[in-house]
Amino acid sequence: MIKRTLVYILQKSSRARRLRIEITPDAQVKVTLPRFLSEKTAENFVREKAKWILRKIREIASTPPIIPHTLKGARREYLESKSRAKKLVREKLIRFNRIYNFSFRKIAIRNQGSRWGSCSKKANLNFNYKIIFLPENLADYLIVHELCHLKEMNHSKKFWELVAKTVPEYKTFRKQLKKMKI
Protein backbone atom coordinates (compact mmCIF):
# COMPACT_ATOMS: atom_id res chain seq x y z
CA MET A 1 0.00 0.00 0.00
CA ILE A 2 1.26 3.48 -0.88
CA LYS A 3 1.18 6.10 1.83
CA ARG A 4 -0.16 9.27 0.23
CA THR A 5 0.96 12.72 1.22
CA LEU A 6 -1.49 15.58 0.95
CA VAL A 7 0.37 18.82 0.28
CA TYR A 8 -1.15 21.97 1.79
CA ILE A 9 -0.23 25.55 2.57
CA LEU A 10 -0.45 26.43 6.25
CA GLN A 11 -1.23 30.02 7.20
CA LYS A 12 -1.22 31.11 10.84
CA SER A 13 -3.59 33.98 11.57
CA SER A 14 -4.08 36.08 14.68
CA ARG A 15 -7.55 37.01 13.37
CA ALA A 16 -8.78 33.45 12.75
CA ARG A 17 -11.07 32.03 15.40
CA ARG A 18 -11.29 28.52 13.98
CA LEU A 19 -9.38 26.10 11.78
CA ARG A 20 -10.36 26.43 8.11
CA ILE A 21 -9.60 24.54 4.87
CA GLU A 22 -9.91 26.22 1.49
CA ILE A 23 -9.52 24.55 -1.90
CA THR A 24 -8.48 27.17 -4.46
CA PRO A 25 -9.65 27.16 -8.10
CA ASP A 26 -6.27 25.68 -9.11
CA ALA A 27 -6.77 22.87 -6.54
CA GLN A 28 -4.29 24.07 -3.93
CA VAL A 29 -5.19 23.24 -0.36
CA LYS A 30 -4.85 26.15 2.09
CA VAL A 31 -5.27 25.68 5.82
CA THR A 32 -5.81 28.70 8.08
CA LEU A 33 -4.75 28.08 11.65
CA PRO A 34 -5.58 30.36 14.60
CA ARG A 35 -2.42 31.37 16.47
CA PHE A 36 -3.56 29.58 19.64
CA LEU A 37 -3.65 26.14 17.92
CA SER A 38 -0.64 23.94 17.13
CA GLU A 39 0.51 22.81 13.69
CA LYS A 40 -0.11 19.24 14.86
CA THR A 41 -3.79 20.17 15.31
CA ALA A 42 -3.87 21.40 11.70
CA GLU A 43 -2.18 18.22 10.48
CA ASN A 44 -4.76 16.05 12.29
CA PHE A 45 -7.59 18.20 10.91
CA VAL A 46 -6.30 17.79 7.32
CA ARG A 47 -5.95 14.03 7.83
CA GLU A 48 -9.52 13.88 9.19
CA LYS A 49 -10.86 15.83 6.17
CA ALA A 50 -8.68 14.08 3.56
CA LYS A 51 -11.57 12.33 1.76
CA TRP A 52 -13.47 15.60 1.44
CA ILE A 53 -10.33 17.43 0.23
CA LEU A 54 -9.55 14.79 -2.41
CA ARG A 55 -13.19 14.82 -3.58
CA LYS A 56 -13.06 18.62 -4.02
CA ILE A 57 -9.75 18.40 -5.89
CA ARG A 58 -11.25 15.78 -8.24
CA GLU A 59 -14.26 18.05 -8.85
CA ILE A 60 -11.98 20.93 -9.79
CA ALA A 61 -9.84 18.68 -11.97
CA SER A 62 -12.90 17.39 -13.86
CA THR A 63 -13.61 20.92 -15.12
CA PRO A 64 -11.56 21.36 -18.29
CA PRO A 65 -9.00 24.16 -18.04
CA ILE A 66 -8.99 26.85 -20.67
CA ILE A 67 -5.94 27.71 -22.72
CA PRO A 68 -6.23 30.99 -24.61
CA HIS A 69 -7.48 30.45 -28.18
CA THR A 70 -5.02 33.03 -29.46
CA LEU A 71 -2.13 30.67 -28.86
CA LYS A 72 -1.50 28.74 -32.00
CA GLY A 73 2.15 28.02 -31.41
CA ALA A 74 3.33 31.05 -33.36
CA ARG A 75 7.04 31.80 -33.02
CA ARG A 76 6.42 35.24 -31.52
CA GLU A 77 4.23 33.81 -28.73
CA TYR A 78 6.79 31.10 -28.08
CA LEU A 79 9.67 33.57 -27.78
CA GLU A 80 7.64 35.87 -25.52
CA SER A 81 6.66 33.00 -23.20
CA LYS A 82 9.80 30.85 -23.20
CA SER A 83 11.66 32.56 -20.31
CA ARG A 84 8.53 32.61 -18.11
CA ALA A 85 8.00 28.92 -18.80
CA LYS A 86 11.63 28.06 -18.02
CA LYS A 87 11.44 29.94 -14.70
CA LEU A 88 8.20 28.17 -13.74
CA VAL A 89 9.54 24.73 -14.70
CA ARG A 90 12.87 25.27 -12.92
CA GLU A 91 11.16 26.37 -9.66
CA LYS A 92 8.76 23.44 -9.68
CA LEU A 93 11.49 20.93 -10.57
CA ILE A 94 13.59 22.13 -7.64
CA ARG A 95 10.58 21.87 -5.29
CA PHE A 96 9.56 18.37 -6.37
CA ASN A 97 13.09 17.06 -6.72
CA ARG A 98 13.65 17.72 -3.01
CA ILE A 99 11.39 14.70 -2.55
CA TYR A 100 12.72 12.51 -5.38
CA ASN A 101 16.39 13.55 -5.48
CA PHE A 102 16.90 12.51 -9.13
CA SER A 103 19.72 13.81 -11.34
CA PHE A 104 19.00 15.49 -14.64
CA ARG A 105 21.14 17.32 -17.17
CA LYS A 106 19.28 20.00 -19.07
CA ILE A 107 15.87 21.67 -19.01
CA ALA A 108 14.58 22.75 -22.41
CA ILE A 109 11.47 24.74 -23.25
CA ARG A 110 10.17 23.94 -26.71
CA ASN A 111 7.34 24.83 -29.06
CA GLN A 112 6.09 21.29 -29.54
CA GLY A 113 2.95 20.63 -31.54
CA SER A 114 1.81 17.44 -29.86
CA ARG A 115 3.62 16.98 -26.55
CA TRP A 116 3.46 18.65 -23.16
CA GLY A 117 6.78 17.21 -22.11
CA SER A 118 9.37 14.49 -22.51
CA CYS A 119 12.41 12.97 -20.83
CA SER A 120 15.36 11.70 -22.85
CA LYS A 121 17.58 8.74 -22.05
CA LYS A 122 20.37 11.27 -21.50
CA ALA A 123 18.32 12.73 -18.59
CA ASN A 124 17.28 15.90 -20.41
CA LEU A 125 13.83 17.25 -19.53
CA ASN A 126 11.78 19.00 -22.22
CA PHE A 127 8.57 20.96 -21.68
CA ASN A 128 6.13 22.76 -23.94
CA TYR A 129 6.16 26.52 -23.36
CA LYS A 130 2.35 26.43 -23.00
CA ILE A 131 2.82 24.91 -19.53
CA ILE A 132 2.53 28.49 -18.23
CA PHE A 133 -1.12 28.56 -19.33
CA LEU A 134 -2.06 25.40 -17.42
CA PRO A 135 -3.71 25.46 -14.00
CA GLU A 136 -1.08 24.89 -11.32
CA ASN A 137 -2.25 21.36 -10.46
CA LEU A 138 -1.80 20.23 -14.09
CA ALA A 139 1.59 21.94 -14.41
CA ASP A 140 2.68 20.20 -11.19
CA TYR A 141 1.48 16.84 -12.50
CA LEU A 142 3.28 17.35 -15.82
CA ILE A 143 6.56 18.21 -14.12
CA VAL A 144 6.35 15.31 -11.67
CA HIS A 145 5.46 12.97 -14.55
CA GLU A 146 8.60 13.88 -16.51
CA LEU A 147 10.74 13.93 -13.37
CA CYS A 148 9.67 10.36 -12.54
CA HIS A 149 10.75 9.22 -16.00
CA LEU A 150 14.32 9.84 -14.84
CA LYS A 151 13.93 6.75 -12.65
CA GLU A 152 11.41 4.73 -14.71
CA MET A 153 11.55 5.30 -18.49
CA ASN A 154 8.13 3.70 -18.98
CA HIS A 155 4.58 3.83 -17.65
CA SER A 156 4.84 0.78 -15.42
CA LYS A 157 3.23 0.30 -12.03
CA LYS A 158 6.51 1.44 -10.40
CA PHE A 159 6.41 4.63 -12.46
CA TRP A 160 2.85 5.49 -11.38
CA GLU A 161 3.72 4.72 -7.74
CA LEU A 162 6.52 7.29 -8.01
CA VAL A 163 4.13 9.88 -9.46
CA ALA A 164 1.51 9.15 -6.77
CA LYS A 165 4.09 9.91 -4.10
CA THR A 166 3.53 13.64 -4.69
CA VAL A 167 0.47 13.75 -6.97
CA PRO A 168 -2.05 11.20 -5.62
CA GLU A 169 -4.76 12.54 -7.99
CA TYR A 170 -2.57 11.89 -11.04
CA LYS A 171 -5.24 9.80 -12.85
CA THR A 172 -7.66 12.71 -12.90
CA PHE A 173 -4.99 15.20 -13.95
CA ARG A 174 -3.71 12.87 -16.66
CA LYS A 175 -7.19 12.63 -18.19
CA GLN A 176 -7.52 16.40 -18.10
CA LEU A 177 -4.19 16.93 -19.84
CA LYS A 178 -5.04 14.39 -22.54
CA LYS A 179 -8.29 16.25 -23.33
CA MET A 180 -6.44 19.49 -23.92
CA LYS A 181 -5.23 20.46 -27.34
CA ILE A 182 -1.77 21.89 -27.52
Image: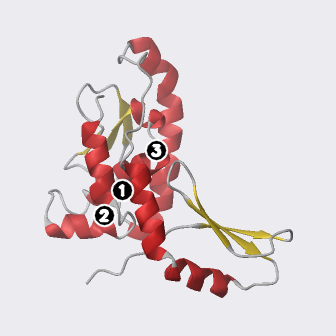
Secondary structure beneath dot 3 equals helix
Q: Which residue is mark 1?
A: 144
Q: Position of residue 44 (x, y in %)?
A: 57, 85
Residue 59 on image: x %, y %:
41, 54
Mark 1: secondary structure: helix
Q: Quadrant of residue 103?
A: bottom left
Residue to which mark 2 is pinned: 163
Disc 1, disc 2: CB below 8 Å?
yes
> Is 125 displayed left or right of 154 in the figure?
right
Seen in the picture, residue 143 relative to 21 is either above or below; the reply is above
Q: Residue at x 38, y 68 (%)?
A: 100
Per the model, the C-alpha gap separating discs 1 and 2 is 6 Å
Quarter of the image that includes the C terminus: top left
CB of mark 3 within 8 Å of CB of mark 1? no
Q: Is residue 177 visible?
A: yes
Q: Quadrant of residue 130?
A: top left
Instruction: Using the numbered discs, state the Cα–Cα distance from disc 2 to disc 3 in whole angstroms.
Output: 17 Å
The answer to whether 48 appears left or right of 63 in the picture is right
Along the polypeptide, which appears first: circle 3 or circle 1?
A: 3
Mark 3 and mark 1: Cα distance apart in space: 10 Å
Name the residue type under label 3: Val
Q: Which residue is mark 3?
A: 89
**Residue 166, numbered circle:** none
The image shows residue 3, relative to residue 158, as above or below, that is: below
Residue lying at 28% horizontally and 68% vertically, measured from the top left: 162
